[in-house]
Structure formats: structure tokens, C-alpha cells
Image (tube, helix red, strand yellow):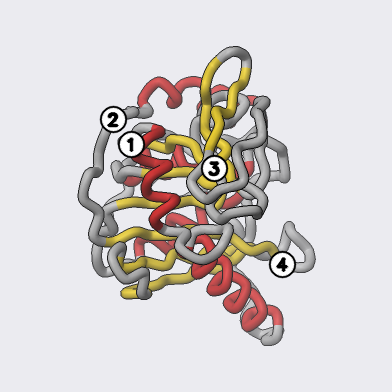
Amino acid sequence: MDIEDLHSWPDSVEEAEALQERLRDRVREEPGPAVVRTVAGLDVAYGSHSDEAVAAAVVVLDAATLRVVESAVAVERPSFPYVPGLFAFRELPALLSALRKLRATPDLLVCDGHGRAHFRRFGLACHLGLLTGLPAVGVGKTFLVGEHVEPGRERGSFTDLVHEGEVVGRTLRTQTGVKPVYVSVGHRVDLDTATRHVLALSPSYRLPETTRQSDRLSRAALRERESDPASAPPPAAAPRGR
């Protein structure tokens, strides 16, 4: 699939933060997509030494049955330091490599991470949405910024996640009596649409099937790579095309 040439790759924390500030106004919040046939889940697993390898997995599910229809993996060395709010710059290169291996383009991306619920309103889901041009949603296991009231115990209950007076996401209960997840807009969706899709993707467990399946695949790829000393990941490099 095509990846847009949006920017050169930052060499420092200051450049990365400035890039997020510059790109955040390009994120579009809109009602679509109303109909989704395929959904891609994206997740990254880190090796025992986080500077040595990351395994990125993309798993495409049939939105109606939640069955896996395609998957791809890339294992690479991270090229950016571990900095809160800038995780995208560690994970994007491998995620984009995995996305390029897909035969078909999914209708929606669901990221294990945040979108607008971010210090600079430009988390991983926003960045991936802009680079691919696809609708994207962020689903965090924990919240990064903001405050919220605990939602009701029932499945489907939610409250707003608010940061500096702005609603940046939702605290969503995907299963009755379990911990909520944190949903935010990535690109080309609105918060109602994002919430609806995440709930539909979570029929039985706290995390959406997109996250569960991509997490499982990324961990398996990393275990396989670490068990074979001859298959070390290639040196870190900036993503192709930027």
C-alpha cells in the first residue's frame, strides 16, 4: 500500500516535537467511515533489550466476522530514543514496513496507542492516518494525558477524556465490570465513529480483536527472531519515502 511522503525523518527530540506540532492541524475529524469491511490492527513488541529490536505486526480482520484475512510482520532496530509522547518515532518505521507488505488496503486502522489523546494532539494513530491517508483510531490500554470520570460498569458506558479543557478522547467500558480502554481520533473519523467501531471490535474481551491479534503476532515474531541468533534485525534506518 502507498505511504505519503509527508516529511523528512527527525534527528532529535526537538525536531520530532516540532513535527508533531506542525502536522496536527492536518488531522481531519469527520463522520466516516460508515461502512467498514476490513479493519487492520497494529501493534509493536519490544525485545528484551528495547534498543535492539522491535517487531511490528499488522493483522487485517473481516469486520463482520472478525476473522483474520491477512497479516504482515517487520522486525527492525529502533532509530529513535525512548521518549514519552514520541513513541511513534520508534515504532512507525517498522509499522510502515509491515503495512507495505499488505496485498490489500484496509478500510480502517486501529492502533495500540493514542491519537488526539496526546500532549500535542498528535499521537501514533494520527501520524499513521496522515501517512497512509486512511481512517485511523487510537486505543490505549492506559491514558497518556487528561482527566476523566470512571464510566458506568456496563459494557458500552463511556465518559469524556479531557485535557486542558478539551475533550481529547473517551474512556470506554468494552466489557461489563472490566477496566476501560481509552479511545481517541486518529484521522478521518470522529469520536462517535471511533467509539462505535472499537466497541464492535470487542465482543468478548477488554481489548479489541485488532489489538489482541496484532499483539499476539508481534510477540510471536519477536520470540522467533530472538531464538535464532543468526537472524538479527537490520540496522536502523529512516522510513523509506521520507
Task: Decide if residue 183 is on the left or right side of residue 32.
Answer: right
Task: Decide if residue 59 is on the left or right side of residue 79.
Answer: left
- In the displayed structure, 118 sits above or below 103; it is above
Badge 4 amino acid: Gly
Residue labelled with disc 4: 47
- Name the N-terminal-most of marks 3 and 1: 3
- Residue 144 can be seen in this image: yes
Residue labelled with disc 2: 30
Please, what secondary structure does the residue beneath circle 3 have? strand
Residue labelled with disc 3: 172
Foreground tag (2 vs 4): 2
Q: Say whether marks 1 and 2 touch (CB < 8 Å).
A: yes
What number is the disc on residue 189? Answer: 1
Please, what secondary structure does the residue beneath circle 2 have? loop
Position of the C terminus by quadrant? top left
Foreground tag (3 vs 1): 3
Foreground tag (4 vs 3): 3
Q: Residue visible at 59% across and 30% down?
A: 118
Residue, far left: 35
Q: Say whether marks 2 and 4 touch (CB < 8 Å).
A: no
Task: State the separation of the CA atoms marked 2 and 3.
Answer: 20 Å
Task: State the separation of the CA atoms marked 1 and 2.
Answer: 5 Å
Position of the N terminus by quadrant? bottom left
- Name the N-terminal-most of marks 2 and 3: 2
